[in-house]
Amino acid sequence: MKKTRVDHKFAELQKQGKKGFIGYLSAGDPNLQDTVDQVLRLEDAGVDVMELALPFSDPLADGRVNQEAATRALDAGATFEGCMTCIQQIRERSELPIIFYAYMNTLLARGFEKAMIESAQAGVDGFLLLDLPLEEAKPYRSAISHNNLNSIQLVTPTTPDERIGKIVKQANGFIYCVSREGVTGVQDEIASGAGALVERIQEHSKLPVALGFGIGTPEQARDAAKLADAVVVGSAIVNAFHNNPHTPEGRAAAAAFVKSMVDAVKEI
């Protein structure tokens, strides 16, 4: 498998001795054209990797903020084809690494192999599949790697060590460490066991570990960056773009907020 933009970005960060910042948005919220502008603004703000949610009607791993973002995207007419066009438009102006955060129903409805081919052709770098069990993953992982896409794996606080070892063997790009039990959403502080979980993962893999779920302020982003190779910020970014006016000025204000978190991470 050839190296993806994700692989190159983490190699660059390691060489520079810097921590990574991964931003999250729901593709199509408030519409797909605005998503293109949001992503480009986040790249300008210093985001290293972009995680875009493929809109789905029942995103069970997500809290209220990201569920509502998915609903807004679907109500605005976001489709798989539209999301791929969105990626193509971003690729006309950017080489920012982009992975899709997706649920299996959406991809199976499209035809999994077809979805992977179309994603690779559009310029997607990888997939984080929220509801694909380890035991059923083999044929799907094969389709992902065959199309030179990263397979990002999740490890949670309830994952036993033996299972962590099996999960990370199927991973490439980076490993997503879920900082706490439950769904996505901004929290008051980083979960107390997050650092220990990152260390457990690092015992099984040399891949970069990104810490996410619940990070919503520059201070929290800085604390998370001390524990892992990268931080993932989702709901706070979704809220920033949703709560500001859907205008160039509003998107600039949201991006400025994200830059404050990026800057905090880069201080580490």
Image (tube, grey):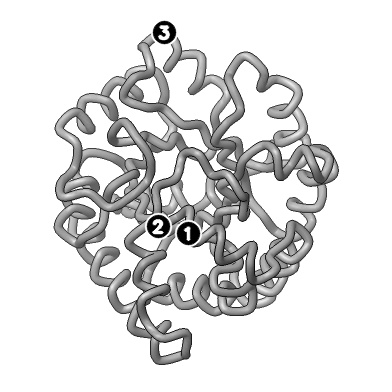
Task: Say above or below: 174 vs 67.
Answer: above
- 203 shown above or below 95: above
Picture residue at 67% right of the left edge, 37% below the top: 104
- Relative to 156, is 27 above or below? below
Q: Residue 156 carries which label?
A: none
Q: Which quarter shows the N terminus? A: top right
Q: How far from the left and from the top, in percent, is residue 194?
A: 23, 32
Q: Which amino acid does label 3 sit on?
A: Glu
Say which of 70 and 142 sits in front.
70
Tag on residue 65?
A: 2
Of residue 44 and residue 54, the one placed in the foreground of this image is: 54
What x and y, as percent, mark residue 129? 59, 37
Q: Callout 3: few (<14), some (14-19), or many (20+) C-alpha neighbours within 10 Å?
A: few
Q: Is mark 1 on a helix, strand or loop?
A: helix
Q: Whole-Å distance between the Cαs marked 3 and 1?
A: 35 Å
The answer to the question of whether label 3 and label 1 lie on touching residues, with beta carbons closer than 8 A, is no
Q: Please, what is the three-letter code of the amino acid marked with disc 2?
A: Val
Answer whether labels 3 and 2 touch (C-beta < 8 Å): no
Residue drawn at the location 50% of the way across and 58% of the way down: 50
Q: Mark 3 points at which residue?
A: 162
